[in-house]
Amino acid sequence: MAIAKTHSWAYVAIWEFRVRPRMKKRFLAAYGPEGEWAKLFRQDKRYIGTQLIQDLKARRTYMTVDFWTSQAAYENFRRRHASEYEAIDARCESLTESEREVGSYVKVGKQIKKAQFGRC
């Protein structure tokens, strides 16, 4: 999934997962950019997309990065869809040994211009 140029993200939620042996295919189907989670999130026009990344050293470790237009958009979505969110989470629980929320991040300011370097 390429982040759409027509949508500017301002907030990301990042989760880390350790996938159980022999569950990789099912995990990728559920957590990938076209997976079950992304399908749920796409119900909200303020959801931008999901990236799924894999650790190169710990090959069963993945992170999802969910892009939203704002923190409020994400939090409101979670409240409105709490039961659906919990149902998917319960169905996917058997796919992973562990999961943890890495954090929630917001985009900071405008891009730094070349002339600004050196000014601290």
Image (spheres, rainbow, N blue to C red):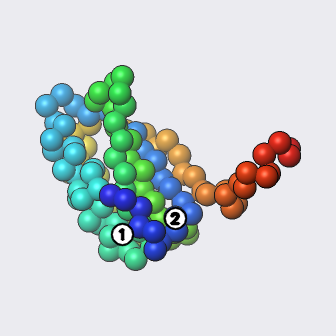
Who is closer to the viewer here, 39 or 6? 6
Residue 9 in percent (x, y) is at: 52, 64
- Name which residue lies at 41% across and 61% down: 3
Can residue 37 be seen here? The reply is no
Position of 114 with respect to 54 (left or right) is right
User: Answer yes or no: do the residues labelled 1 and 2 have beta carbons within 8 Å?
Assistant: no
The local secondary structure at tag 2 comes to loop
- Name the disc covering residue 20, or none: none
Name the side, left or right, on which 109 lies relative to 59: right
Label at residue 81:
1
The location of residue 78, given as percent across then percent down, is: 43, 65
Give the amino acid type for the residue marked by disc 1 in the picture.
His
Label 1 neighbour load within 10 Å: few <14, some 14-19, many 20+: some
Instruction: Report the quarter where the N terminus lies.
Output: bottom left
Which residue extends farthest bottom?
Answer: 45
Relative to 81, say whether 59 is above or below: above
Residue 65 visible in the snapshot: yes
Vertical order, 23 against 47 (above or below) = above
Q: Which residue is mark 2?
A: 9
| Gap between marks 1 and 2 measured at Cα | 21 Å
Q: Please tell me which residue is depicted at 38% across the width and 47% down the height of the picture.
A: 64
Q: Nearer the viewer, residue 52 or 21?
A: 52
Crowd class of label 2 (few under 14; some 14 to 19; many from 20; radius 10 Å): many
Q: Quadrant of residue 48?
A: bottom left
Q: Quadrant of residue 108?
A: bottom right
